[in-house]
Each structure stands twice: as C-alpha cells, then as structure tokens.
Image (cartoon, grey):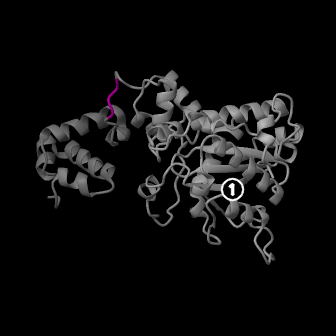
Amino acid sequence: MVPARYSEAMREVKDKFWWRQKMVKYAQERGISEAAQEFRTTRKTVRLWLYRYLKEGVKGLLDRSRAPHHIPHKTSKELEQKVIELKKRYFTFSAKRLKEQYDLRISEGAMYRIWHEYKLLRRKKKYQRQRDLRGLKRKYKVLEKVQMDTKRLDDIPELYPAYLKYRLPRYQFTARDVRTGGSWIAYAREGSLTNAILFLRLLGGHLARHGVDLKKVHVQTDNGGEFVGSWQRKELSEFVKLVERDWGGHFPIPPGAKTYNSDVEAFHGRIEDEFYRIESIGSYREFFGKAKTYILWFDYQRYNSYKEGSPLQLLRESKENYPEDIFNFTPMLLDDYINQIPGYDLPVKYRKNLF
C-alpha cells in the first residue's frame, strides 16, 4: 500500500502526473475498487482520472485550469486596450487619476492587473525607508519656504528633436512653494548666476505685487554654481546676497543631500513626464504657449495625492489671504526677458524695480 492518502500526496508531491499515472495503471490492472483502496482515495477519484486517461491519453492526467469559462463582468477588449494606451502615454499617472480624468468604467484593481499582465508597471527599487515628511510640511505656512532649482531640457530624448529644430531654451528655472506645491517657472539658454538673479527678481516682484512679504519667505537651493557661485568663491554670490537682503534668508542644502530639495525635484519629474515627454512641439512660440498651459493646469487643477489637494485648493484652505492669481506667472526667456517672442513681451509693470 502507498504510504500516504491520494489527497495528501497531491498537496505534498511535486510530480502529480507521475502519481496519477501510477494510480491509473494500477486501476487498469486490478480494478477501480482495489486502486481506490491501494491509493487510499475514493472510487470516484480513480474513475475520474481513468476516464480522462482513456479519453485524452497522458494529457488527461495534467492539472486543468479552474478559471470559469465565462466571466460576465470581464473587462472588454476595447476598454482593456484603452487602459493600456493611456498607461503607455501617461506612465506616471496612477489608476485613480486616469480613471477620474477619462471617466473609465473599470476598477483601479483591474487597471493594475492589466498593467501588470502587460509589464507596464515600474518596479520600485528597494531604497532605505525614508521618514515621511508630509506631517512636517503641512505645518508650513503658504510661501513660508520656497525651493529653487534648475532643470536641463537638452537631455530629454522625446524633446530633443524640437530642441534642436526650434532652438528651445536649455534650462528651466523653477521655484516651488513647499506647503501648497504651487510652482513658477522660467527658461534660459544659460544656467548662469545672472539668470538665477533675474528669475529671483522677477518672481519676487510678482509675489510682492500679490501681497507677499518677501522677508517671511525662506529660499532653499542646492549648491549649484547658478546659485552659490564658484566653488572657489571667497564671498557670498550675488544671488545669495540678494536673498539675504530682500527675502527671509538663504538655506543651501547639505552637499549631496538631494532629498532636501525633494519638492522641486518632484515637480521636475512631473513636468518631464506629463509635458516634455508627451507633448508635440511645432514651433518656438508653441513651446512657450504649452508651457504656460501646463503650469496653469498644474497649479489650478492637478490634484496632488501626496499633498492631498491641488495648489489652488490648498491656498484656499489656508489662513493666508493671498489672491488666487498668485500662481499666474507667465514663463519667459530670462536671457532676453524684455524682448520676448511675439505675444510674450514682458509687461511694463514687470520691468519696475528689477535691480
């Protein structure tokens, strides 16, 4: 007699096919009842596998899928294809965001199942778990802390053909409010200290006109030359002097501590994925027009799940009585900010008190 019941063997052994083949052979030689007794199972089980063996041969002894033959609520091929196409285009968007924006009649779990099946999900690296700073950032007041940084545009493959054809700017200067996530951008051909100062002055003038006391705004940057100057410097750069004089103070991040500027870095990742990598650019003018459209959408409509609201929504919920127009800052070319391209000339009011 075999040492284990058939049901126990099916849970333990790896080669179920061999076990069934042995049982079927025993049944053919000595009968179903004796095979059931020998393999310590029921006659019904022996009869089932013997029937399958006689009908299909050795293939009948293999396990069969237990999935139902008909699933009434299964996602249609058309909807499944749409979910796949949307993920390929907006690969950083979550299932929740795509479902809301495109009114998809499918559960978020089903969307992730489809993306997993077609290998469209990014595998996250196992970095050391970082402290969740959301609670700390919620304690900031609106425009109490602003992070600034630059982003290169000539290293984005999808944008590079338009960059060469229309001589697009190479750098993006960005400032982002830590509390609301509201962002302001400008462009430059050179990531220079001069352009950093121009951006700071233009942004400062814009915020001041909307009732912001710059002395209460702390500016945080990395240690790039466009902000702190040459590494061989013996005194503070003009950018730092300006921040210390007109703003609430300059706070450079520790060398190598990139996560300290995570808010503005996160925005750079979003604008690359949601704008530069997916939008077609047909002219120099169109680039600036679409850039303004994107930044307005980002500040006024885009829901940020990390901050739990759009910048406009968080501004409205704050105690600061700043006008909603505070996020309406037209992206411009800093190298030639007075003589902008047609339709983007710098208004006279922006030219006052720049220096």
Q: Amino acid at mark 1?
A: Asp
Q: To which residue does mark 1 refer?
A: 149
Is disc 1 placed on a helix, strand or loop?
A: strand
Residue located at (63% from left, 39% from top) = 274
Q: Name the foreground residue: 331 vs 141.
A: 141
Residue located at (86% from left, 36% from top) = 340
The percent coordinates of residue 46 (x first, y second) are 19, 41
The quarter of the picture where the N terminus appears is bottom left
Residue located at (51% from left, 38% from top) = 310
Q: Name the foreground residue: 219 vs 48.
A: 219
Q: Name the foreground residue: 255 vs 80.
A: 255
Task: Residue 238: tell me if it is visible.
Answer: yes
Task: Residue 279: tell me if it is visible.
Answer: no
Residue located at (82% from left, 46% from top) = 334
Which SS does the magenta portion mostly show? Answer: loop
Q: Quadrant of residue 50?
A: top left
> From the viewer's perspective, is 8 left or right of 329?
left
Q: How many marks?
A: 1
The percent coordinates of residue 332 (x first, y second) are 78, 40
Q: Name the foreground residue: 163 vs 91.
A: 163
The percent coordinates of residue 301 (x first, y second) are 54, 32
User: Quick check: 248 above or below 61?
Assistant: below
Q: Is residue 70 magenta?
A: yes
Magenta region, residue range? 67-71
> From the viewer's perspective, is 335 left or right of 310?
right
The percent coordinates of residue 109 (x first, y second) are 40, 37
Q: Is residue 336 magenta?
A: no
Q: Residues within 10 Å of mark 1 (few under 14, many from 20)?
A: many
